[in-house]
Each structure stands twice: as structure tokens, then as C-alpha cells.
């Protein structure tokens, strides 16, 4: 029987003291491949941060079904990552081995070999000594996927993983996502491209601060549901014009 990987129980999350996700109930099943879609400001990125434990819950619960923090791989939005830090590509990928090495442990020969294989898998063989600041956006995203490959997590959270990268890189990284799904990992990705959602993700949570629909993509991403989500977004804008100014950065 398929068991629950992550359950959301009447979940409410506040961002900068403003409600961002309201009374969300549902389950990401183990081994599922789910897109989280919705308009800007819908609480999509906020939801992933809360699932990672980076944001406190206003009410409700996130039940992780005995999944520990080390079992979760997380890729934040590219804008949240500072590439000015003096790290090489190899060092960045090896950060994915922290589960095996510990916070201050030495990197084993096996981990170093796995890191090289991960770079090869994302098309960056021989890039180990390059500085991450010298990479294109697409190359850097490949590095971050290589780090996730090395981490070998059972649950993978991706926040806008294909934004501002070229079509070939998007295709290659979507292939990795599909392999994770085939391996039985639970993958949850925040996406803004509805065509990508329909083409590659069998399950979708359509979020507009609350769940508009959650289930098979073909029944979730309907014109009626998308219209409802847009209408709800317009209502937030009207409320924001009446109330005090809010931080609209929540995605």
C-alpha cells in the first residue's frame, strides 16, 4: 500500500506576519511527482520553506511520516543563492555529502568519486575546479542538481528550478526529475510554466493561499480552476489596496 510521505493538516503559514497559506489539507504520497502552481503571491515558495522548517507555522501541522531533515533535499530559488562566495564547482557539489560526512567530517574518496559522477550526469564533467561565479545560470543550476544527486534524498523540494535557464538545460534537468520519480522518490516542485506542469507532472496542487484544487493534473489545471485562482489573486490585490502595504515577495 502506498503510504503518505508528507501530510498537511489544517496548515496556516504567516509570512512577515501576514497570512500566506490558509487552512491547507492534503497529502503528498511517497513516490509522487507533484507541481505546486498558482498566481504570484499564492504562497507556493512559503509552503516549501515551511516544509523545510525554515518558517514557523501559524497553526496546523506538517506530518513528515518519519522523514528526517536529512532525508529532504531542497533547491531554493536562484535569486536566494549568493554565488560570490569563493566556492568551486566541486566544493559546491560536495556539500551534498554532508549527510555522510557530518558538519565537520572529512570527505571520503567515495564521496569525491560520487561528486564527479554527479557532475557527469548533469553534463559538467571536468568542471570541478571552476568557480561557481564564472558559470552561466544554466550551468549553475546543473551544479545544484548535481549536489542534490549526491545528497541522495528520498524527498526533493524544488523552488522554480527552471526559471531563467535555456531550453536544453531545462530538458536535461527535467530528465533528472523524471529519473527521481522512477526511482520512487517524492518530488515537489514550485512551477510557473503551466505547460511544463501539464507535460511532466502527474499531480498538481493549485494554490491561491488556499487549495483551489489538488489531485491529478488533468483535473486540477482546468480553465475553471485557473480562473478561480486568478479571481482570488485579484481579490488579494483589492484587499492590499485597502489595508496596510504588504510584502508581495511571497510566491
Image: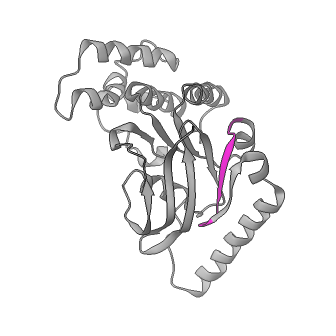
What residue is drawn where x is 55% and y is 86%? 243
Residue that protrudes farthest toward the right in the picture: 223
Q: Position of residue 91 (x, y in %)?
A: 30, 26
What colour scheme governs how the chains and residues are painted in the rendered image of this protein?
A: one colour
With respect to residue 233, does 84 lie above or below?
A: above
Residue 85, image quadrant = top left
The C terminus, quarter of image: bottom right
Q: Position of residue 191 (x, y in %)?
A: 62, 47
Q: Is residue 87 above or below residue 113?
A: below
Q: With 12 as the anchor, is 206 left or right in this view? A: right
Seen at 45% across and 45% down, the residue is: 76
Q: Nearer the viewer, residue 91 or 9?
A: 9
Residue numbers of the magenta segment = 200-210
Q: Is residue 160 visible?
A: no
Occupied quadrant, residue 14: bottom left
Total marks shown come to 0
Relative depth, front residue between 90 and 62: 62
| Residue at the far front in the pictured view | 1
> Does residue 201 show up magenta in the picture?
yes
Would residue 98 be counted in the magenta stretch?
A: no
Residue 89 position, x and y percent, is 37, 24
> In x, y percent, where is residue 182?
59, 26
Q: Is residue 163 left or right of residue 222?
A: left
Q: Left or right: 60 with respect to 104?
A: right
Location of residue 84 (image quadrant): top left
Query: In the displayed structure, would residue 216 be above or below residue 235?
Result: above
Residue 68 showing in the rendered view = yes
Q: From what the image shows, is residue 179 above or below residue 39? A: above
Quadrant that contains the N terminus: top right
Amino acid at each position: 500500500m502506498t503510504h503518505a510521505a508528507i501530510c498537511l493538516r489544517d496548515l496556516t503559514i504567516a509570512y512577515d506576519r501576514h497570512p500566506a497559506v490558509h487552512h491547507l489539507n492534503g497529502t503528498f504520497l511517497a513516490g509522487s511527482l507533484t507541481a505546486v502552481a498558482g498566481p504570484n503571491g499564492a504562497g507556493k515558495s512559503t509552503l516549501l520553506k515551511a516544509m523545510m522548517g525554515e518558517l514557523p507555522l501559524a497553526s496546523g501541522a506538517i506530518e513528515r511520516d518519519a522523514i528526517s531533515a536529512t532525508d529532504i533535499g531542497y533547491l531554493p530559488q536562484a535569486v536566494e543563492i549568493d554565488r560570490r562566495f569563493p566556492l568551486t564547482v566541486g566544493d559546491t557539489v560536495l556539500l551534498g555529502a554532508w549527510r555522510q560526512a557530518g558538519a565537520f567530517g572529512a570527505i571520503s574518496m567515495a564521496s569525491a568519486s560520487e561528486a564527479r559522477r554527479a557532475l557527469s550526469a548533469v553534463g559538467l564533467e571536468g568542471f570541478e575546479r571552476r568557480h561557481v561565479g564564472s558559470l552561466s545560470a544554466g550551468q549553475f543550476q546543473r551544479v545544484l542538481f548535481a549536489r542534490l544527486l549526491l545528497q541522495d534524498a528520498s524527498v526533493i523540494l524544488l523552488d522554480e528550478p527552471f526559471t531563467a535557464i535555456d531550453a536544453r538545460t531545462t530538458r536535461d534537468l527535467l530528465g533528472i526529475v523524471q529519473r527521481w520519480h522512477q526511482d520512487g522518490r517524492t518530488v515537489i516542485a514550485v512551477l510557473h510554466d503551466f505547460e511544463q506542469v501539464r507535460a511532466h507532472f502527474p499531480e498538481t496542487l493549485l494554490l491561491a493561499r488556499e487549495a483551489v484544487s489538488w489531485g491529478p493534473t488533468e483535473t486540477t489545471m482546468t480553465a475553471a480552476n485557473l480562473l478561480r485562482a486568478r479571481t482570488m489573486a485579484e481579490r488579494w490585490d483589492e484587499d492590499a489596496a485597502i489595508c496596510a502595504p504588504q510584502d508581495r515577495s511571497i510566491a
